[in-house]
Image (cartoon, rainbow, N blue to C red):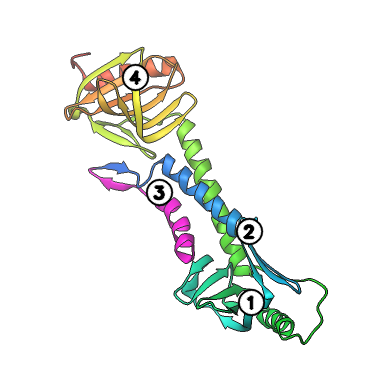
Amino acid sequence: MGWVIIIVCIIIPFASFFPLVKSNEPILLADSNMLVFISAMMLSILILFYRLRVRVNSDYLYIVLGIGIFRKKIALNSIVSARPFTCKLWYGWGIRFLPHATVYNVHGISAVEIRIKDKDRSVIVGVKNPDDLCNYINANINNNLNLNTESSVSSVKPAAMKFIYSLILILTVIPLLLVFYLGIREPRVRLNEASIELKGLYGFKYTFDEISLLDTVSVLPPIIMRTNGFSFNNNLKGKFRLKNIGHARMFVKSGHTPYIIVITNRNEYLLFNFSDNQMTRDFYIKLRDKIGGFIWL
């Protein structure tokens, strides 16, 4: 866990949308599958570690993280001492296993170090008011107080952690919505003076001199697998591996024939269409006129 996860969860969704430009072709650092995985991971982290509850009674001290999957119970008669402790920033967030201790923390640097009988490793618990918890534990184990009631000390999230939680939630939802929107949006293929181009997600740019074959087809080649792309319902966008063809770029709404197929002199395949069949036919005619006189498939 720790700050590394927080930093990764913040940086990767942003980095995934910054294209690496090479030969005027945008290449995404991560595809939609990776974004979904990262977003799911961030949500899981938030659910598992969004809060820390410390509960203590006359017999046990309970440490519960998030929804309760990660928890620890310590018998008070096994505790040697409890003292206020200041966590290092690099101890991070969640559960950390250090050479000398196990740390449970979801915020700040205020904590309690609990030493246990016959154990070389102590337990460090992040709390807002460490003095209160220390006094309660020490009073009980030293039999200075007759405690018949249960006390609860919660780790209250400060403003900084609330901001981090909100930021992670935003970065979880926005990439998913953006990828979904870009995936189902009509491809914005345009004809320039000397090239055909699509900017943005899985974009491309081919000059007319690079195009060796152009045609329309009514049936899509069988798809073997999606290598770096988006697939939802009848929307296919990105890089796919096709039977008898190999790798190809597809910007297709399946079921809306025809499909325009372009092959470059580097043997790169491109298939695309629009939801409006007539718009696809009109675009094909414009592209054919721009290229002029090539061999059709």
Residue at 25% x, 20% y is 244
* Spatial CA span between label 2 and label 3: 28 Å
Q: Which residue is mark 2?
A: 66
Q: Is residue 39 above or below residue 86?
A: above
Q: Amino acid at mark 2?
A: Gly
Front-lying residue, 212 or 86: 86
Q: CA distance from mark 4 to mark 2?
A: 46 Å
Identify the mark nearer the N-term, 4 or 2.
Answer: 2
Q: In the rendering, which numbered label is found on residue 78?
A: 1
Contact between labelled residues 3 and 2, with CB atoms less than 8 Å apart: no
Residue 170 in view: no
- Kindly check if marks 3 and 4 are in contact, taking CB atoms under 8 A apart as contact: no
Q: Earlier in the sequence, mark 2 or mark 1?
A: 2
Q: Which residue is mark 4?
A: 222
Tell me the magenta residue range.
Answer: 1-23
Per the image, the residue denoted by label 3 is 16
* Secondary structure beneath label 1: helix
The residues bearing labels 4 and 1 have C-alpha atoms spaced at a distance of 66 Å
Q: Amino acid at mark 1?
A: Ser
| Residue 292 as seen in the image, left or right of residue 222 | left
Closer-to-camera residue (46/78): 78
Q: Which of the two labelled residues, at mark 1 and mark 3, occupies the earlier sequence position?
A: 3
The disc, 2 or 3, on the residue closer to the chain's N-terminal end is 3
Instruction: Locate residue 122, reporting x and y percent.
Output: 54, 77
Count neighbours of disc 2 (C-alpha within 10 A) and say few if under 14, some if 14 to 19, many if 20 or more: some
Disc 1 and disc 3: Cα gap in Å? 49 Å
Q: Is residue 20 magenta?
A: yes
Measured in 3D between alpha carbons, the distance from the residue under mark 2 to the one under mark 1, in whole angstroms, is 25 Å
